[in-house]
Image (cartoon, grey):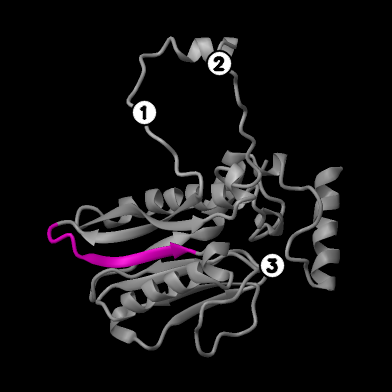
Amino acid sequence: MPSPFPGMNPYLEQPSGWHDFHQAFIAKIRNALTPQIVPDYIAKIEDHIYIHELSGDERRFLGRSDVSVVHFEPGTAAATISRAVAAPASGLIAPGVDILHESFIEIRDRETFEVITVIELLSPTNKNLGSDREQYIGKRKAIYRSNAHLVEIDLLRGGERMPVEGMPPCDYVVMVSRSYERPRVELWPFGLRDPLPLIPIPLRLGKQDATIKLTSLFQDQFDAAAYGNYIYRGHPQPPLAAADAVWAEDVMRQVRR
């Protein structure tokens, strides 16, 4: 089932759906870019790794907080079946650490492997105040000091916007920072009721930009992953402005018919 909203779906901004969407959408963007940039460039998916020390109460959990882990006692049918597979080498999981992987894209020159463009899809990790945000902003500053372009896609209403002078009020925004135009950046601000924009992906100076059709990629991903089967519980978080809440409820009323 496709998303009933013309652009971003506000119900997707929740722990049960966002991380899955983030990882899958990055892959979808890479796959859409590749035919446009070969043979001169390659698009690689890389990971940010955030390591968190957990408190004593949190150490009983592994992974995201909405994931259930089923435990089988030795000798049960499930345990017996699993032993039918040849035993691998074994190790231990550090119980006091949570490791979060978040993907991004690097476009590299095929011959020199130089990073040409970095594409980031922001997550709550980047936008919530704390050490993870500071770590990301540090990477952002390093890109600004390099010859690489930065494309930053923010499809989250929650959290703090990335620091950009002259940012207009908006629900969502895409920023394109071309290395040869800094400190000037290009901004595509848009609202909840707007379609997601068509955005350029800069390559080497003098070469034509690639493009990403965010709306069509988003709708394809939303439909393929069947997010509509489970995200429409409760209300969007963070809460919508009053007029947008009335509008969103009307959209959902059409879905429920």
Q: Is residue 109 left or right of residue 136?
A: left
Q: Nearer the viewer, residue 70 or 240?
A: 70
Please tell me whether residue 240 belongs to the stretch shown in magenta: no
- Mark 3 and mark 2 lie on one chain; the one further toward the N terminus is 2
Q: Amino acid at mark 2?
A: Pro
Circle 3 residue: 192
| Residue 74 image label | 2
Would you say the magenta stretch is mainly helix, strand or loop? strand
What's drawn in magenta, residue-wise? 111-121
Q: Position of residue 136 (x, y in %)?
A: 43, 70
Q: Nearer the viewer, residue 22 or 83?
A: 83
Label 1 belongs to which residue? 90
Say whether marks 1 and 2 touch (CB < 8 Å). no
Q: Indicate left or right for 114 with 71 as reference.
A: left
Please name the residue shown 42% across and 83% down the image: 185
Q: Amino acid at mark 3?
A: Leu
Q: Earlier in the sequence, mark 3 or mark 1?
A: 1
Find residue 4 and name its label.
Answer: none
Residue 47, quarter of the rendered image: bottom left
Of all residues shown, which one is farthest toward the left? 111
Give the Cα separation between the discs numbered 1 and 2.
Answer: 17 Å
Q: Residues within 10 Å of mark 2 (few under 14, many from 20)?
A: few
Q: Earlier in the sequence, mark 1 or mark 2?
A: 2
